[in-house]
Amino acid sequence: MTRRTPDSRQLAEMAFKAATAKAAPDLPKAPSIPGAKELVSLRIDRDVLDFFQDGGPGWQERINDALRAAAGK
């Protein structure tokens, strides 16, 4: 099998095609579900974590409430 090298016309057509091709559309964002929680990994100082955990169960919700208040929400 011999390998055919593209001639100048083929090269020009390939360059034109690449320059005029439409970009792929952005994918839509996932729908936001009101009240849904997002799983994240977060580094918190040990003393801050101890403060919230000392209150017993519900410490994650208390951290969420503190962050919400800090965000002005």
Image (cartoon, grey):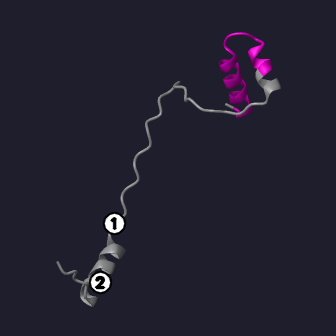
Q: Which of marks 1 and 2 is in front?
A: 2
Label 2 belongs to which residue?
A: 11
On screen, 45 above or below 52? below
> In the rendered structure, which segment of residues is drawn in magenta?
50-72
Q: Position of residue 57 (x, y in %)?
A: 68, 10
- Tell me the residue at 72%/10% (across/down): 56
Q: Position of residue 38 (x, y in %)?
A: 55, 30
Kind of residue indicated by mark 1: Lys
Farthest residue toward the front? 1
On screen, 72 above or below 65? below
Farthest residue toward the left? 1
Q: Residue 22 carries which label?
A: 1
**Separation (CA) of disc 1 from disc 2:** 19 Å
Q: In this view, does 49 lie to the left or right of 39?
A: right
Q: Position of residue 12 (x, y in %)?
A: 30, 85
Q: Position of residue 73 (x, y in %)?
A: 67, 30
Question: For numbered disc 1, what is the local secondary structure?
Answer: loop
